[in-house]
């Protein structure tokens, strides 16, 4: 069965520093991996995806993620954090082909001025 | 995302009441989904639909039912609400042969 783990409930970063939000997955076959962001009182917004191809995927708002097949990880990164990046981040893996998404529990990112 | 709308945005109801949450989309997507979000649990899939005639149960469908009235509309019903159905509910859509889903703003449901 497919599963996703986000090992950190919260990540704290100073503005201007690089950030990493961790995600590991378990899936049979080739993984389809996604990152979503949720701002307060808003729905989830799609950030980026890995389906195939280059292991480094670039997405919205300057975010990128690195697919590592040997470590079954898909960590979200940004070179320089902004206070406005503070939000709840979800990693998801495509299950049942790509018809369904299985979400991690979420990681709250807090960027301090 | 303004292309996926949910009504109501907030609802408080009592145990045993029937309640319907509605989702509409103008994206022209054929796939539609209902999720619930609980703190520390992420999002869990309740039901999904590939088209008007194709409805499928997700991982937590007990206590819920759905109706796909048209390609653009997908409703979620709680026949007899109970307090542990208190959660944030999201509708999402996906276009055929693509991978990412697009979410509505959510409905916060409280069952007392």
Image (tube, coloured by chain):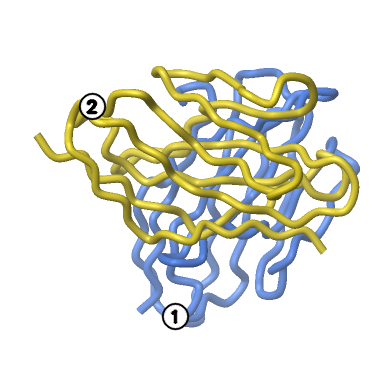
Chain colours: A yellow, B blue
Return the x and y of residue A27 as percentages of the image width and height.
Answer: 80, 54
Dot 1: element: helix
| Residue, far front | A70
Q: Which residue is mark 1?
A: B83
Q: Does B8 sit above or below residue B43?
A: above
Task: Determine the residue positioned at 64% across, 28% down.
Answer: A49
- Tell which subunit mark 1 falls on: B
Return the x and y of residue A8 as percentages of the image width and height.
Answer: 41, 59
Left or right placement of residue A39 versus residue B59 in this view: left
Q: Which residue is mark 2?
A: A82
Q: Are marks 2 and 1 in contact (CB under 8 Å)?
A: no
- Towards the viewer: A65 or B60: A65
Which quadrant of the view contains residue B69?
Answer: top right
Mark count? 2
Which quadrant of the view contains residue A94?
Answer: top right
Task: Determine the residue positioned at 32% across, 56% down.
Answer: A10
Task: Determine the residue positioned at 43% across, 70% down.
Answer: B86
Left or right placement of residue A12 versus residue B49 in this view: left
Q: Does A74 sit above or below residue B82?
A: above
């Amino acid at each position: 069965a497919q599963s996703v783990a986000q090992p950190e409930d919260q990540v704290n970063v100073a503005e201007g520093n690089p950030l990493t939000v961790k995600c590991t997955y378990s899936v049979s076959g080739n993984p389809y991996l996604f990152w979503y962001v949720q701002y307060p009182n808003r729905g989830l917004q799609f950030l980026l995806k890995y389906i195939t191809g280059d292991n480094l995927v670039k997405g919205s708002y300057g975010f990128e993620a690195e697919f590592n097949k040997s470590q079954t990880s898909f960590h979200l990164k940004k070179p320089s954090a902004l206070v406005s990046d503070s939000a709840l981040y979800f990693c998801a893996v495509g299950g049942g082909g790509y018809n369904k998404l299985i979400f991690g529990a979420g990681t709250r990112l807090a960027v301090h001025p | 995302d303004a292309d996926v709308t949910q009504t109501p945005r907030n609802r408080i109801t009592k145990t045993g009441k029937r309640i319907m949450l509605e989702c509409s989309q103008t994206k022209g997507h054929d796939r539609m989904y209902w999720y619930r979000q609980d703190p520390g649990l992420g999002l869990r899939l309740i039901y999904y639909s590939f088209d008007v005639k194709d409805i499928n149960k997700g991982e937590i469908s007990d206590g819920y039912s759905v109706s796909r009235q048209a390609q653009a509309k997908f409703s979620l019903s709680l026949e007899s609400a109970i307090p542990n159905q208190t959660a944030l509910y999201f509708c999402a859509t996906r276009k055929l042969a693509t991978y990412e889903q697009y979410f509505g703003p959510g409905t916060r449901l409280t069952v007392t």
